[in-house]
């Protein structure tokens, strides 16, 4: 049983899946940092707030200065700023995957072979295949015009 498990684990598909999972997790952290540290601060500045991720709607009757304070108090909140960050992260990841898959498909496409002139033609009298340069059919001995 142990040998079967080892064969299963070292098969190419499992190893490829593990590498893809690790790369995906690293890419996810990279995109999260891009959104939270690069994209959202200017957007937050444009709407007049410093931290876009701290936007929330307080469902309890009390006032809280920040999302962290409301969460520490156990208040029910709708965290739409965090949700918007997540939506933007998703769009970036989806676009990156779209570009990646498009490039992989482009690289996998086989180059189209150049159109070459046919090497043979069909005799119009006996319908057998003969070389393109033939002027007389070797089967029915008919004289062929050079343009046929």
Image: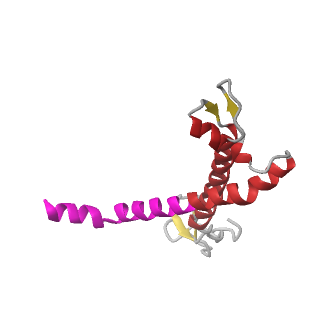
Residue 50 locus on image (x, y percent): 79, 51
Q: Quadrant of residue 134?
A: bottom right
- Colouring convention used in this rendered image of the protein: secondary structure
**Residue 128, visible in the rendered structure:** no
What residue do we see at 57% from left, 57% from top? 28
Identify the residue at the far left of this view: 1
Residue 103 locus on image (x, y percent): 63, 63
Q: Quadrant of residue 93?
A: bottom right
51 relative to 141 in the view: left or right: right
The answer to whether 128 is drawn above or below residue 80 in the figure is below
Most frequent secondary structure within the magenta stretch: helix
What residue do we see at 61% from left, 72% from top? 132
> Total marks drawn?
0
Q: Nearer the viewer, residue 108 or 30?
A: 30
What residue do we see at 74% from left, 60% from top? 38
Does residue 7 belong to the magenta stretch?
yes
Q: Nearer the viewer, residue 76 or 127?
A: 76
The answer to whether 74 is drawn above or below residue 26 in the figure is above
18 relative to 6 in the view: left or right: right
Identify the residue at the far bottom of this view: 133
Please report the bounds of the magenta region as a residue range: 1-27
**Residue 47, visible in the rendered structure:** yes
Identify the residue at the far top of this view: 61
Q: Nearer the viewer, residue 137 or 128?
A: 128
Q: Quadrant of residue 69?
A: top right
What residue do we see at 63% from left, 37% from top? 70
Q: Quadrant of the N terminus?
A: bottom left
Residue 123 locus on image (x, y percent): 57, 62
Does residue 37 belong to the magenta stretch?
no
């Amino acid at each position: 049983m142990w040998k079967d498990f080892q064969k299963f684990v070292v098969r190419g598909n499992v190893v490829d899946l593990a590498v893809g999972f690790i790369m995906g997790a690293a890419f996810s952290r990279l995109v999260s940092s891009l959104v939270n540290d690069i994209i959202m601060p200017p957007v937050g500045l444009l709407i007049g707030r410093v931290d876009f991720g701290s936007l929330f709607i307080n469902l309890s009757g009390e006032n809280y200065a920040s999302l962290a304070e409301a969460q520490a108090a156990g208040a029910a909140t709708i965290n739409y700023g965090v949700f918007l960050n997540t939506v933007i992260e998703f769009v970036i990841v989806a676009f990156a995957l779209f570009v990646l898959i498009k490039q992989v498909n482009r690289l996998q496409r086989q180059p189209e072979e150049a159109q070459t002139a046919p090497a043979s033609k069909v005799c119009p009298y006996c319908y057998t295949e003969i070389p393109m340069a033939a002027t007389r059919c070797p089967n029915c001995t008919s004289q062929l015009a050079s343009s046929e």
